[in-house]
Amino acid sequence: MAHRTAIIGDVHGLLTPLQRLVGRLSLGPADQLIFVGDLVDKGPAPAETVDFAASLWESADYDVVLVEGNHEDRHRRYRRNLTVRPKIAAEQAGSAGELPGLTAELSERARAFLDSAVPFLRVEPQGILIVHGGIPGSMDVFPESAEAFAALTGKPRQRMSKILRTRFIDKDTGDFLAQGKEKPGDPFWADVYDGRFGHVVFGHQPFLSGPAEFPHATGIDTGAVHGGTLTALVLDGDARHYVQVPGIEVVAPQQPSDYSPAAG
């Protein structure tokens, strides 16, 4: 069987849908499974979800990679602060109970899997760049490797970390805008992204109507934890297709935003 790459959108603690989706993918030893980030939080079984993903990673039946999402980043910083800045960790725990809760429930291999997360991933020969959030319009250089990313410090590191959280960007400067800070006319990043770093596959922004296809980007967070579906984008040579399973049933599906891709 030819090498395939399956990229799964935001899971958010939905163990059963993830198990069903992985089963439907029928991946083999030559294949690769990539999580686009945000395995944890919001859903009913975050620790079990990470442990299931870690079991796939540990089994080595096929290559498994976790691209870090903003939720994994937050938990990683909390676990680090428990050791190096316990007062800060206590403040974090006080405002977000899911931080100590998940940490207490994680198995050893689940922690190891979370610690293996990479900030981004390139998929060749398709020329795809996988990030969790997006690309600010003001970003004109991108690290060649995760090691180069890790070597960044100070403001360059802070600028690059925005790829975990980018949604809307300033219409004049292209700069990252924190959630809720966008103004009328500020575009969603993928509507204006010009493909300078390759075709980007991303999560972070839920699209309840299905995968969002832009000229140079594809959004695969289809809101599984908000009443939508859990989606995998499968790359098979030059061909690509989606595999989807139902997400969690909710009484009133949450609409994180009313955003939808621009027409055309």
Image: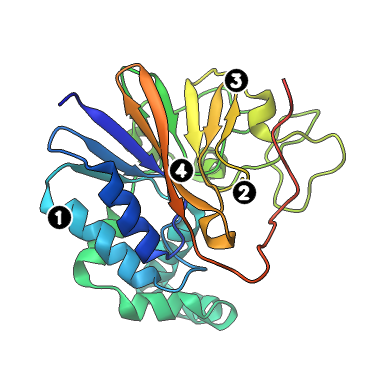
Instruction: Residue 88 in the image: state x and y as whole percent.
Output: 51, 75
Nearest the viewer among 85 and 182 is: 182
**Residue drawn where x is 59% and y is 79% of the image:** 95
Dot 3: element: loop
- How much space separates mark 1 and mark 2, taking CA atoms? 32 Å
Q: Residues within 10 Å of mark 2 (few under 14, many from 20)?
A: many
Q: Amino acid at mark 2?
A: Leu
The residue singled out by tag 4 in the image is 153
Q: Which mark is residue 215?
A: 3
Dot 1: element: helix
Q: Which mark is residue 12?
A: none
Quadrant for the N terminus, please.
top left
> Can residue 243 be seen from the camera position used here?
yes
The residue singled out by tag 1 in the image is 58
Q: Which mark is residue 208?
A: 2
Disc on the earlier residue, 3 or 1: 1
**Residue drawn where x is 33% and y is 37% of the image:** 6
Q: Residues within 10 Å of mark 1 (few under 14, many from 20)?
A: some
Instruction: Residue 33 in the image: state x and y as whole percent.
Output: 28, 41
